[in-house]
Structures are given as C-alpha cells and as structure tokens.
Image: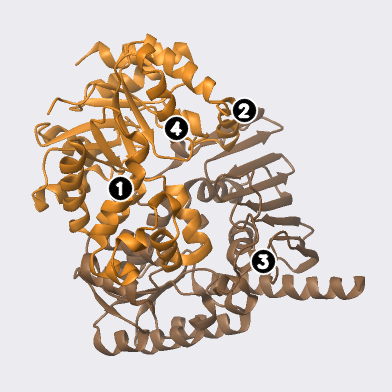
Chain colours: A brown, B orange
Amino acid sequence: MSTEIRVGIIGAGRMGLTHHSIINALPGVSVTAVVDPSRIMTALIAKYCGVRTYGDHQAMLAREQLDAVLLCTPPAANAEILEQLAAHGLHTFVEKPFLLNAPSAITIARRFADAGLVNQVGYVNRFNAVFTEAKRLLDAGVIGDVIRFRSEMFSPTITRETDESGWRGTHANGGGAVYEMAAHSIDLIDYLFGQPDVVTGTWMSSVFSRQVEDIVSSTLLYRDGRAGQLYVNWSDTSYRKPTNKIEVFGREGRLLADQHGMKIYRSTESDAFELKVGWNTIYITDVFESVPFYVRGMEFTAQLDHFIACIRERRPNRCSFTDGAATLGVIDRLFADFAATRGVLN
Amino acid sequence: MAPIDRVVFGDNQFFGINHMSQDKAQAMTERFLHIDSIFDVYQMAFDSGVRAVMLNSNDRAAAICDRFRAEASCLPAISWYPSIPYPHKYASLVAEKGLVGALNDVVFHDSALGGLGRILQGGIAFVSRDGMQLMRTLVDAEMAMFKSLDVRVIFVQNIVTDLLLGLGVKDFFADYCEHVRRKYQAKPGFITQNLPALREALIAWGIRDVVICAPVNKIGYLMSPDLDTCERATRDNDPADYEIMAMSTLASGALPAIEAYDYVNAQNIQSVVFGASSRANIEQTVRLISERR
C-alpha cells in the first residue's frame, strides 16, 4: 500500500494525544478524525490540529473514510466499539488492557483474524530495545535453561488518597493496579516465557485506593517445572518513573533487565554470546534502533511504526489481540485466585 | 540580539535525572538534597569559566533562582537559559484527573496562576476558543521565578515541543515565539528529539531566529529520525536562522568525553549544554568544548 494511511483516534486522553502526535508524524500516515466526549478537547483539537472531531465513534464511522483506528478509551466500553471497527473493516490498535476479561477478548481476536485485519494491543515493552534483546538472548540460551524468573513493576502513580469517581476508581471500568500496571508485567512474562499453567498464592493490597488494589503479587507455575513471581506496586514513591524489571535465573547464569539496560551473569565464559565469566552489562545505547519521530520513549514510536508496517506489508503482529487475550487470561486467574485465598482467610 | 553562549551548564544532574540508571539518579538526588551542594557545583562551573546556565522551572528551581539573586554581588554575570514547563507537575495532575480534569484544575485552582479562571473571562469555555491565551498565561506563571535574571533564551521542554510538533499545532510555535520576544525580550527556543522535523516545520511556517536544542552524539542516541538525517540538517543549517545547541553529547554516558566532543566540535553547532557534578569532569568538558570553534 503506497497511498496515505488515514487514521482515526477514539479517546483523546493522555495516551490518545500521545499516539496522535506520534502516528501523525510517521511518513505516509495522517490522523484525519478524532473522537472524544469532552467538548473542550474536541474544540481544541479541531481548532489547532486541523482534524475533524466527533463526540462519539458512531458519527465518525458513519462519515469518515478511514484505514485504521487507534482505540484509546477506558476498556469497559471497548467490546462494543471493537465489534463495530471490525464490521467497518478497520485495522485497529487498542490501548492495554484491551478488554476486561479473556472470553470477550478471544471472541474479538477471532473476529479481527477472520476479517484479515491488523490488530495490536499497546503492550509497549515488546518494543523496548532492551526487552527485545533479552528475549532474543534468552531464546538463544544465554543463561541456559530457565528455572526461575521474577517480573516486577514499580511506579509512583497512586501516592495518596484521591478522588475515585473517574474510570480509574473501579474494576468494572478497568481501574486498579492489575488492569493498569500489572498487565504490563504479565505481558512481559507471556512474551518471554509463555503462559503459565497455574496461578497461585495471589495477594492484593490496598495502600491508598479504597475500591481497587495498589499492590499485587502472585506465583506462576509451569508444567515443565519453571516457576515465576509477579510483584507490582504503583504506590512506590522511591521510583521516579514507571519501571519494569525482570530477573531470570538459568542453569548457566542470571539475567537482570529493565527498560534502560541489562546485566548478565555467566558462570562460565561464552564465546557464542561474547560474554565473560561474571557480570556483563548491556545498555540501551548498545541496542537501540532510531525511530522516525520521538515523543516519549522510543518504544512508543516503535510500536506504532510496527502497526503501520503490518498494515502496509501484511506482516504478522508482535502484540496481537490474541496476545492481549492471553494476558487477560492470567488477569482473570489472578482475580479468581485472590478471591479464593481471601475466602480461606475469612 | 547577541549570539548564544558556546557553553551552557545544565541541571539534570541536580534533580535525579539519569536516563541510564535509576540507582545513579537516586544517588544524585540524595547528594543534592541541600541547595548548598548545588551551589558548590555551580561554583566549580564558574571557576571553569562557564557563564551560562540552563534551568528547568521545576519545584526546586525557584529557591535556586532566589539564591542567585541574593548572591548576585559575589557571582559572575550569568546568562540564563530557562526551560519550561516542569512536565512532571502536569503529568501527575493528568494521571490523577485526566486531561480535562487537569485543565480544569490548572485554570481554576492552581494557586501559582492566581485564579487564572477569573482572569480568563468565561474560564474553561474561553480556553477552548483561545488555547493560546492559556499558553501565554502558563508561560508567564512558569517564568515568574526567573524575574530580574538576565534571560537570553526561553526553551520549551522536549515533551511539549515534540508532542505539539507531531500534532501539527503551528499556532503554538508562532504565538510562543512572539510572546517570548515581546514580553521577555528573549529568544524563543525549543528542545526537541526531532531536530530535522522541527527545523523543516519552522521553515515551512516562516518562523525564524529560534534556538533549537537537540541531542548531538556520534551514536545517534535520541536523534530521530536517524543520525544521517540529523547530521545533514545540522550541516545545511544557517545559524542566522536557527542556532543549534547540542545536548546529550555523551549519549547518557555511552561515549567517553574526548571521543564525544571530537564529534560534537566537528558539527555545525553553535552551543553545547552539558551537566556534570565533579570539578574534574566540568573542567575537562569546558576545555574540550572550547578547544575548537
């Protein structure tokens, strides 16, 4: 496809605006319409960005000729919107967590696959150069067979009691540390190690939130004997920015990684990987790839660049709706396991 | 207006900003908890001949500016290069209340803005008709702390520059430049990680005599769309139109200083902003930047 790709954006919140800016700057792509319920946002966007705006997605779908849509709304309303996007034959990128449970996600994933439409969920870590390099190295056996892992995420997101009347206040609307943050750590687990067979020992704690959790931890088990730990805390003010961390122990060493760099400990020297005995460090500056336009982190551009490349070249997608459904499958089990454990304690 | 300073002393080291390591960032935050330790480092920079300072309008900057004013008689004459806004302040507000909630808050409740809602007749409805009036008021609020300092260039932080560049908000760039020139008799500046795209847009929009601050390092780190395009844009640039200030010259520590400045000095750039916190590093960097012009 050499013609310009016309993109519509549903939801002009923080992520919607960021994606709008990035994708509009990619060569051969332009945002032509934006949907948001806020009259102030649509008035500002119409006036200063020169795009047509709508108060709801039906109006946009009825009037616009689009090739693709970025869906950046809270997940509670997404099932119905996604059905309509598929019916209109639109390639779709949706912000995580995509939907609120695995069964609806599997149905939607099948709809898009059957229609031959590109579909992608915004799990941005799959486009971070350190994590993609970690996957390449782990798959190639850089620390031998993986036995244990830990996937953690920390951020200073909820650091005091706040007004919970917005969509972030309840699970029904996709609020809480599990849907909003742990989803990233779970997706990294799925990306690096595959889906766990058993989810157990899940516990969720409230720090400041009243209706949702601020901390979640769990144990993930695999039939082949591997085991992993999940720990996510979004009320940790000792972190300046959201940070994902992984730690992997294998028969031949250990690998630690976050978005900025990676350390690999090898118990023996490896010529194949050019690694010495002991600690080896790989920085983001060793593995990054330039992106066509930068707004807030290379991975945010890389994921949309990939979305466009999949539309143009019919490439398989690195983070499809099926991957998003897998993460929701683990989330469903986290909630069920936590409810069961709490039942035992009560 | 006078050309910009060749060497500008930046501020990331003071505020726990390290793109490579959270641990290093934490250690720096602890070291610079007290303003005296910040001024010890400024003194080292002045001893090395630095006479220009870039400072972001963050929550500690007002106290730093106060001290510069109070001790003006003991300090050399300094040229100021503020960068605005303090993005974190707005990012937290947006994370908590959403964009519209944050906008409401800023317009009606931000004490620093002194009840902006009352100033803007019609409040939030007015904002949607004239976002540029809100922009000018926010600029003035951020700039209040730099009052009576010798401000040469007022930079817009890259998150704002690049977001609005991608969105294609020409009015912002034009109105911002006009406001800075008229109200502050300073040059407008934009920090960006998309130097070629910004320069092209400014040319297309007929906006000139602007300072562009962008990463310049030989590995092309944080230089979009890529190293070659950035090098070409810099080479083709006429400093009479756009003076270029290089930042991220060490690529977050990936490059040794001598190698880094060999490269930077060979580029068609007019200025370098750098941060460092030891006397040896400051002296070495100033010497390396000044070696060739």
Separation of marks 4 and 2 at Cα, in angstroms:
33 Å
Which circle marks residue A346 in the picture?
none
Q: Which residue is labeled 3 in the image? A: A195
Residue B189, percent across and down? 23, 39
Separation of marks 1 and 3 at Cα, in angstroms:
49 Å
Count residues near mark 2 (Cα–Cα under 10 Å), then give few for <14, some for 14-19, many for 20+.
some
Query: What's the amino acid at mark 1?
Result: Val
Do badges 3 and 2 share one subunit? yes
> Which subunit holds the residue at mark 3?
A
Question: Which structural element holds mark 4?
Answer: helix
* View extreme (right): residue: A345
Q: Are marks 1 and 3 in contact (CB under 8 Å)?
A: no
Q: Are marks 4 and 2 in contact (CB under 8 Å)?
A: no
> Which subunit holds the residue at mark 2?
A
Total numbered circles: 4
> Which subunit holds the residue at mark 1?
B
Q: Is residue A124 above or below residue B291?
A: below
Q: Which residue is labeled 1 in the image? A: B139
Which circle marks residue A276 in the picture?
2
Q: Which residue is labeled 4 in the image? A: B12
Which is more toward the observer, A189 or B270? B270
Q: Is residue B122 above or below residue A298?
A: below
The residue shown at (66%, 50%) is: A236
